[in-house]
Image (cartoon, helix red, strand yellow):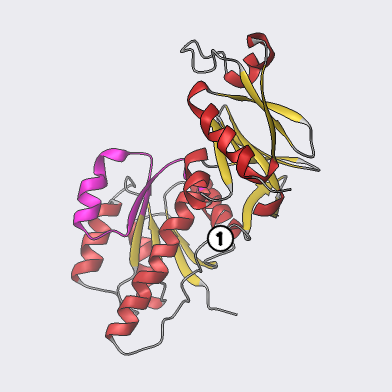
Amino acid sequence: MNAALRVLIVDDESLARLRLRGLLDAIAEPRCEVVGEAANAAQATQWLAEHRCDVVMLDVQMPGVDGLNLAEKLRAVPPPGGAPLFIFVTAHAMHALQAFELEALDYLTKPVRRERLQAALARATLRLAERAAVQGLPPPVAAPAPLEAGEFITLTERGRVLRVPVSDVLYVKAELKYLTLRTASASHLLDGSLSDLEQRFPSRFLRVHRNALVARAAVRELERHAATNFGELDGGDPSGEAADSWAVRVAHVDEWLAVSRRQVAAVREAIAGVRC
């Protein structure tokens, strides 16, 4: 089993540390181990004087020395265990430029999305591997393999961490602040964005509407319907995007999803290309 990324969480809010720990625990790859927590810069400095970690998840605004000043001091005088990588996690976007001037690996704004955090951690493994290569050492943590269509989407539900095979996903629909992921047997709530999934699995999903992706293999038919039939899915959009009132039928669940006018041609091509 590959070694886990050792992570120190530095945030003055205990609930923020707890939520970040939960997000890290839910990420299957790269694996992470929270090896320490600190509520301020002084505690973090003391911890780093006695322990070693790969990544520091660092809040910006804290009582006393803030996160930016702490990172600057640790860059100037690295701790005994070596300079860790910094990922800033903050509710304030205005400090991003200063953070990257300090060579921060990433700058995440709260509430942090798991997919965004996972991407930052994947970059951390690559950065650590580059450091090790310069020193002629093996990488301390193996970089995760690229996500392919045959892999999993990881989500947290009722305190459980679930891995849903991407091949089981029929569609994903954006609703309010969350995504609904639909399989033949269940619906799940998922953090993240449709754009992230579309970029990760371009050959798997087809965009049918601004608020929906459908598995290409699950597309069964395209049909024109009365405009009122799909108002719920269209989100009451007055822009006319769904004015032609097209809808696509999804296999296995026999549900219909609205298709925006601009996506009709792409859906037709997908149907023509499906081999069942």
Q: Secondary structure at mark 1?
A: loop
Q: Amino acid at mark 1?
A: Glu
Question: Horizontally, is 146 left or right of 155 in the view?
Answer: left
Query: Residue 100, image x and y in percent?
Result: 23, 54
Q: Quadrant of residue 228?
A: top right
Q: Is residue 253 above or below residue 258?
A: below
Q: Which residue is mark 1?
A: 148
Badge 1, how many Cα within 10 Å: few under 14, some, many 20+?
few
Q: Is residue 82 above or below residue 108?
A: below
Q: Quadrant of residue 130?
A: bottom left
Q: Answer yes or no: is residue 167 visible.
A: yes
Query: Residue 9, image x and y in percent?
Result: 45, 59
Q: Residue at x 59, y 63 (%)?
A: 28
Residue projecting furthest to the bottom: 136
Is residue 175 or residue 25 the one in the foreground? 175
Q: Residue at x 41, y 81 (%)?
A: 139
Residue span colored magenta: 88-113
Image mark count: 1
Query: Residue 197, image x and y in percent?
Result: 53, 46
Q: Quadrant of residue 70?
A: bottom left
Q: Residue at x 33, y 39 (%)?
A: 92
Q: Residue at x 51, y 21 (%)?
A: 261
Query: Residue 75, image x and y in percent?
Result: 22, 67
Q: Answer yes or no: is residue 80 visible.
A: no
Please check the rendered image and state whether residue 94 is part of the magenta-colored stretch, yes or no. Answer: yes
Screen quadrant of the N terminus: bottom right
Is residue 154 or residue 107 the one in the foreground? 154
Please check the rendered image and state whether residue 183 is part of the magenta-colored stretch, yes or no. Answer: no
Q: Is residue 237 above or below residue 169?
A: above
